[in-house]
Amino acid sequence: MTLSADAETALVAAARAAALNAYAPYSDYSVGAALLFEDGAVITGCNVENASYGLALCAETVAVAKALGEGRRGGLVAVAVTGPADKGAKGTRGAPITPCGRCRQVLNEIAQLGSTDPIVLCVGTTRTERVRLSDLLPRAFGPANLA
Ligand code: THU
């Protein structure tokens, strides 16, 4: 499935809106994620940190937990991830961010349940990179292995 320009714009806007709710007082690094499903539903998440730093939950993981918790078992067609505009080493400020390794695995869980290979929109301030989840996490281990 290719994503229309309108659908992409809406998904990015949803991820940016989700990032406004980020609870990131320790890293000051707000992340938003938005998941698009085959039926048009969008489920969002933001990162949620904790005074016990290592317990931080990433935006993508929160979004996937919400989706699974609402009964979704597949149908994931696209994901948008936004990072902060004012962070990044010299020359990379506001550059698109890709999901961390754990989030790739968590995204793979719900994707593989429905046999989709979602397009991941890595959203920066001036450009967006589009990459398949299977390119971010090749040869993934998932629920199919345990069937
Ligand atoms: N973070 C995400 O929410 N998603 C990622 O894919 C990478 C990192 C969050 C975790 C933490 O709250 C903050 O960004 C800094 O690492």
Image: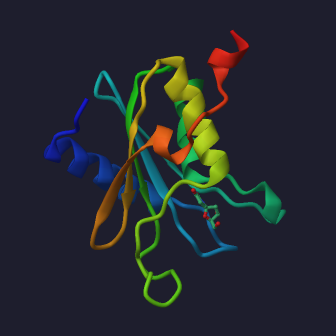
- Asked where in the image residue 37 lies, by quadrant, the reply is top left
Q: Position of residue 8 (x, y in %)?
A: 24, 47
- Closer-to-camera residue (13/112): 112
Q: Is residue 71 visible?
A: no
- Closer-to-camera residue (43/130): 130
Task: Quadrant for the N terminus, please.
Answer: top left
Q: Residue at x 67, y 29 (%)?
A: 141
Task: Quadrant for the C terminus, please.
Answer: top right
- Asked where in the image residue 28 lies, by quadrant, the reply is bottom right
Q: Residue at x 43, y 82 (%)?
A: 93
Picture layout, residue 52 above or below residue 143? below
Picture layout, residue 25 above or below residue 52? below
- Asked where in the image residue 142 lies, by quadrant, the reply is top right
In this picture, residue 66 sits left or right of residue 15: right
Q: Is residue 49 visible?
A: yes
Q: Residue at x 53, y 23 (%)?
A: 112
Q: Position of residue 55 (x, y in %)?
A: 79, 55
In this picture, residue 141 sits left or right of residue 32: right
Ligand 1 is found in the corner quadrant, namely bottom right
Q: Position of residue 111 (x, y in %)?
A: 50, 28
Q: Seen from this angle, which residue lies furthest bottom?
A: 90
